[in-house]
Image (cartoon, helix red, strand yellow):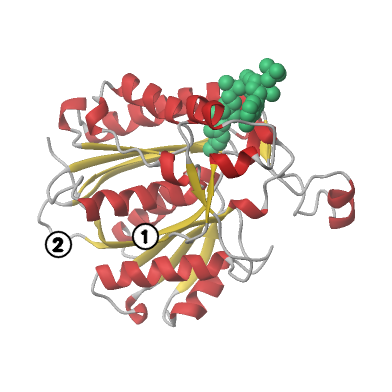
Amino acid sequence: MQHDIHSKILGSGVAIPPKTLTNADLEKIVDTSDQWIRERTGMVVRHVVDENRQNSDLASEAALKALDDAKMTAEEIETIIVATVTGDVTFPSTACYVQSKIGAVNAAAFDVQAACSGFLFGLNIADSFITAGKSKNVLIIGCEVLTRIVDWQDRSTCVLFGDAAGAAIVGPSSGDGRGILGTFIKTDGRLTQLLWMPGGGTRYPADVALAENLNSIKMRGQEVFKHAVTAMGDAATHIMEITGLTADDVDLLIPHQANKRIIDATARRMKVSPDKVFVNVTKYGNTSAASIPVAFDEAMKSGALKTGDICVMVAFGGGFTWGSAAIRV
Ligand SMILES: CC(C)(COP(=O)(O)OP(=O)(O)OC[C@H]1O[C@@H](n2cnc3c(N)ncnc32)[C@H](O)[C@@H]1OP(=O)(O)O)[C@@H](O)C(=O)NCCC(=O)NCCS
């Protein structure tokens, strides 16, 4: 197996809001049950950001931890990519606020909007920037405050989402064979209306969005489920082809944590055994762009991933978007 190593994850960090929302709490808000949520999604708890904290606060907290982990200063960051669909404001980008909050004065900063695949879109860009010599150290943060855009009267969506941030510093590989082995991203813009938030843009001005209840996540759950399984499979197949990896080479699969049943279907399709699949959807719910970096950080810090292991990440999300990455950590 021969790979050109271009870039590498140098450190990671997370920010998880302390406040929790359990299935039992949700039973008091909508007509649902702990049993239904567990059986259909695998979720038990999610975290909810405090009213006085914004996306960029959470993102900055995760970023500072990732810098610490990488033993780097904010001044060494040349590019900041924030992957989110729940930014502080419509513009400027949340990455600008993060830059200011962490003091990364030498960076260019921008957001990537690819829903739950956002972190892997960011990783693809970071790898490309570093490979092309356009940037040395890139900070990528997947950060979401989804509890502020769910409709708390819609039981088919409000039980699914949580808040979190996960950050990674990506820099040039030191040539020790460790680093990003390959990345893959894809979109099908014909499926935009399966999962979206209509309000908040220019199509439905604020007064219209408010009057028509468009300022929240709208989802056609069963169709999303079907496309998710296909997209995750496609992303997995492509990354194995690009890198030449086989299922036996994979030490840990980190799938986007949207639903335990989608995770299981992806693992089966990849022929990766369940003990090699990282699952934390139970305790965070779906945190969209934060899902993969939070799982990666937990896998690194818990020892589920050890130096030299091969990790494959696979995600899908609204758009439809999907993507994957393979890394020797
Ligand atoms: C949302 C999801 C869990 C629903 O599960 P499902 O098995 O498809 O359920 P359905 O939508 O067919 O609904 C089945 C029934 O459960 C009900 N239901 C929906 N949400 C419920 C809830 N929270 N509690 C109890 N019942 C619920 C429905 O109203 C429906 O009732 P009915 O048969 O009387 O009409 C599932 O479709 C899913 O996970 N989709 C993908 C979502 C996703 O991953 N989104 C993020 C992408 S990044």
Image x and y of residue 249, in percent: 16, 32
For badge 1, the amino acid type reads Phe
For badge 2, the amino acid type reads Ser
**Which numbered circle lies on residue 129?**
1
Residue that carries the numbered disc 2 in the rendered image = 174
Inspect this view and state whether residue 7 appears. yes
What residue is shown at x 54% (from left), y 32% (from top)? 34
Inspect this view and state whether residue 224 appears. no
**Which numbered circle lies on residue 284?**
none
Mark 1 to mark 2 CA distance (whole Å): 16 Å
What residue is shown at x 28% (from left), y 73% (from top)? 68
Is disc 2's CB within 8 Å of ligand 1?
no
Asked which secondary structure carries label 2, the reply is loop
Image x and y of residue 175, in percent: 12, 57
Q: Quadrant of residue 181?
A: top left
What residue is shown at x 47% (from left), y 61% (from top)? 18
Image x and y of residue 88, in percent: 63, 65
Q: Nearer the viewer, residue 51 or 11?
A: 51
Query: Is 170 placed above or below 265 here?
Result: below
Quadrant position of ligand 1? top right
The mark closer to the camera, 1 or 2, is 2
What residue is shown at x 56% (from left), y 51% (from top)? 113
**Is the N terminus in the top left, top right, bottom left or bottom right quadrant?**
top left
